[in-house]
C-alpha cells in the first residue's frame, strides 16, 4: 500500500509540475493571445451549471440548519377573540372574550433520533460538495474540448483554403496545357470537378468552425478571439495502475458514493430509533379575558405501539437502500477504473496515430512534389496530381484530428483521476468556498453575529 508521503509526492509530480505549462501560458506576453488557461478561467466564472449546483449545495446547508433547529424549543404566541350572541330561551347571551397565550415546547429525549437527523444532513452536505467538484471537472473538460475544437476547425479551414488555392492553380495549368494540345478536355474537367469539391469542403470547414465557436461561447461565455497554441500537455502518471490508484482515492464520484453509504447507514439507525419513545416538555403562559395570567407546564412521553406495519416497512426499506448504496459504491469504482483505462488507451492510440500520420505526411509530400514535377514533363496526368494532392490533404486533416483527440484524452485522464479542478490546475483565481455559507448557517441563525456573517456571505456571492 502506498504511504501518504508517497501519495502526496505522486500528486505533486502529476499536478504542480504538469500544470506549470498552463500557468506559463496565462502569463502576459506581447500581442496577448487567449490561452487555454484563460478559457478555463472564463468557463469557471461564467458557468450557469456551476451556479445551479452551488445553489443546490446551499440548500443542503440549510437542511443542517433545519436539523439543528429541531433540537431547540419552539416558542409560539396565540391571540384569540371569540364573540357569542345567542337568543335561545330562557335568556339572551351576548359575550365577547379574548385570550393571549405564550407557549414553548421542546423534545427532551428521543433516543438520538434528532441527532441522527443532524448527522444525516451533514453527510448530505459533504456528498453534495463532492457532486459540485464533479460538475466543476465536467465544466472544465467541456471548455478544453471546445478550445481544442476551435483550434482544430481553424487548422482544417486553413488546409481547405490552401487546397482551393492549389487546385485552382492546377486548373489554370490544365487549361493552359489544353490550349497548346498537351492535355485533353477530360483533364480540364477533372480539375474543375476537384475544385468544386474543394470549395464544398471549404464551406463545410467554415460551418464546422462556426459550430465550434458557438460551443466555445456556450462553454466560456464569449466567442474565441486569437486563440494561442495549446500548451505542453500536463505530466501524467507513469503507469495505468498508478492512475487507477489515484482515481480511486481522489475522484469526487468515489467520495460522493462513500458519503451516500454513510448516509444510508445512518438512515438504518434512524429507522430503528423511530420505534423508541419520545419525551417532550412544554410550558405556557395565558391571560384569558384579561382576568390574570396563568402558568402551565408539563411533560409528555409517547411511543407508537402499532402503525399497521409502517415502521417495520420503513426499517426494511432503509436496509435495502443501504445495500443499494454499497453496491453503488462498488459500481462507481468499476466505472472510474474503466474511465481511466479508456482515457489511457485513447492517449496511446492517439500518439501512435500521430507517429504514423507524420510518416504518411512526409511520404505524401514527397510523392505530391514528385508527381507535380513529372506532370510538367508530361509523364503524369492532371488526375495523378490531384490524387496526390488529395492524399496529402487527407493526411494533414487526419493529423489535426489525432492531435485534438490526444489533447482531449490527456485531460480526460486527469478528469477521471479527479485532478481537473481550478485548484489543482493552479489557475490563480479566487474559487468558490463551499464552507463559507455552511459555516454561516450551520447553527441556524436568526439575528445574531452569525446572522450578520450570513449577510456578508450572501453579499459576497451576489445573492442579496
Image (tube, rainbow, N blue to C red):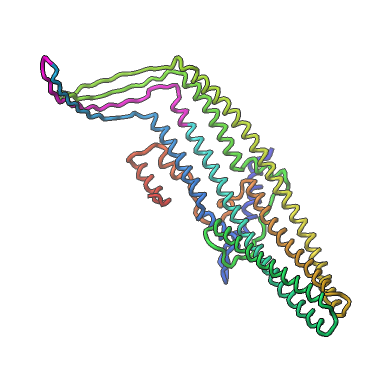
Horizontally, is 339 left or right of 442 in the view? right
Could you say where residue 79 lies in the image, as x and y percent from the top left?
22, 29
Any magenta on residue 307? no
Could you say where residue 454 lies in the image, as x and y percent from the top left?
38, 44
Q: Tell me where the magenta segment starts and ends, as one range.
A: 89-118
Asked whether residue 41 appears in the rendered view, the answer is no
Please report the residue visible at 55 percent of the width from the left and 42 percent of the height from the top: 130
Q: Residue furthest front?
A: 185
Residue placed most toward the observer, 396 or 180? 180
Any magenta on residue 95? yes
Which quadrant would residue 19 be assigned to in this image?
A: bottom right
Up-down relation of residue 438 to residue 144 (above or below): above
Up-down relation of residue 3 to residue 230 (above or below): above
Count of number-bearing discs? 0
Could you say where residue 341 lies in the image, as x and y percent from the top left?
71, 45
Horizontally, is 44 left or right of 280 in the view? right
Horizontally, is 89 left or right of 331 in the view? left
Residue placed most toward the observer, 305 or 167? 167
Asked whether residue 279 appears in the rendered view, the answer is yes
Q: Residue furthest left?
A: 91
Could you say where residue 131 lies in the image, as x and y percent from the top left?
55, 42
Quadrant housing the N terminus: top right
Q: Residue furthest bottom?
A: 180
Up-down relation of residue 144 to residue 338 (above or below): below
Please report the residue visible at 87 percent of the width from the left and 80 percent of the height from the top: 377
Please report the residue visible at 48 percent of the width from the left and 35 percent of the height from the top: 122
Which quadrant would residue 277 be assigned to in this image?
A: top left
Horizontally, is 3 left or right of 87 in the view? right
Amino acid at each position: 500500500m502506498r504511504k501518504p508521503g508517497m501519495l502526496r509526492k505522486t500528486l505533486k509530480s502529476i499536478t504542480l509540475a504538469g500544470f506549470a505549462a498552463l500557468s506559463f501560458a496565462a502569463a502576459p506576453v506581447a500581442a496577448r493571445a487567449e490561452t487555454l488557461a484563460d478559457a478555463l478561467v472564463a468557463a469557471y466564472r461564467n458557468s450557469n451549471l456551476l451556479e445551479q449546483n452551488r445553489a443546490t449545495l446551499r440548500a443542503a446547508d440549510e437542511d443542517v440548519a433545519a436539523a439543528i433547529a429541531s433540537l431547540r424549543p419552539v416558542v409560539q404566541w396565540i391571540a384569540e377573540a371569540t364573540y357569542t350572541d345567542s337568543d335561545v330561551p330562557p335568556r339572551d347571551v351576548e359575550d365577547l372574550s379574548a385570550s393571549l397565550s405564550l407557549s414553548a415546547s421542546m423534545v427532551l429525549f428521543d433516543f438520538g433520533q434528532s441527532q441522527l437527523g443532524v448527522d444525516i444532513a451533514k453527510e448530505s452536505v459533504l456528498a453534495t460538495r463532492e457532486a459540485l467538484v464533479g460538475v466543476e471537472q465536467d465544466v472544465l473538460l467541456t471548455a478544453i474540448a471546445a478550445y481544442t475544437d476551435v483550434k482544430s476547425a481553424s487548422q482544417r479551414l486553413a488546409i481547405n483554403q490552401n487546397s482551393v488555392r492549389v487546385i485552382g492553380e492546377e486548373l489554370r495549368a490544365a487549361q493552359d496545357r489544353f490550349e497548346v494540345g498537351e492535355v485533353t478536355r477530360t483533364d480540364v474537367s477533372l480539375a474543375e470537378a476537384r475544385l468544386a469539391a474543394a470549395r464544398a469542403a471549404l464551406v463545410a470547414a467554415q460551418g464546422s468552425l462556426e459550430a465550434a465557436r458557438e460551443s466555445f461561447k456556450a462553454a466560456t461565455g464569449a466567442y474565441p478571439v486569437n486563440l494561442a497554441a495549446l500548451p505542453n500537455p500536463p505530466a501524467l502518471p507513469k503507469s495505468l495502475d498508478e492512475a487507477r490508484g489515484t482515481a480511486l482515492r481522489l475522484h469526487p464520484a468515489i467520495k460522493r458514493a462513500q458519503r451516500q453509504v454513510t448516509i444510508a447507514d445512518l438512515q438504518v439507525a434512524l429507522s430503528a430509533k423511530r420505534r423508541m419513545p419520545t419525551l417532550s416538555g412544554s410550558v405556557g403562559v395565558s391571560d384569558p379575558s384579561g382576568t390574570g395570567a396563568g402558568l402551565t407546564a408539563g411533560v409528555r412521553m409517547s411511543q407508537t405501539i402499532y402503525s399497521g406495519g409502517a415502521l417495520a416497512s420503513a426499517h426494511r426499506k432503509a436496509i435495502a437502500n443501504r445495500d443499494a448504496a454499497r453496491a453503488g459504491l462498488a459500481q462507481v469504482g468499476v466505472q472510474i477504473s474503466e474511465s481511466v483505462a479508456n482515457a489511457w488507451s485513447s492517449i496511446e492510440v492517439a500518439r501512435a496515430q500521430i507517429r504514423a500520420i507524420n510518416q504518411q505526411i512526409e511520404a505524401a509530400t514527397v510523392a505530391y512534389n514528385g508527381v507535380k514535377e513529372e506532370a510538367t514533363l508530361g509523364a503524369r496526368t492532371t488526375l495523378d496530381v490531384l490524387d496526390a494532392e488529395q492524399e496529402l490533404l487527407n493526411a494533414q486533416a487526419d493529423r489535426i484530428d489525432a492531435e485534438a483527440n490526444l489533447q482531449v484524452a490527456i485531460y480526460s485522464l486527469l478528469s477521471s483521476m479527479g485532478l481537473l479542478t481550478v485548484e489543482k490546475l493552479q489557475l490563480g483565481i479566487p474559487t468558490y468556498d463551499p464552507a463559507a455559507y455552511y459555516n454561516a448557517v450551520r447553527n441556524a441563525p436568526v439575528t445574531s453575529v452569525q446572522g450578520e456573517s450570513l449577510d456578508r456571505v450572501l453579499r459576497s456571492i451576489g445573492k442579496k
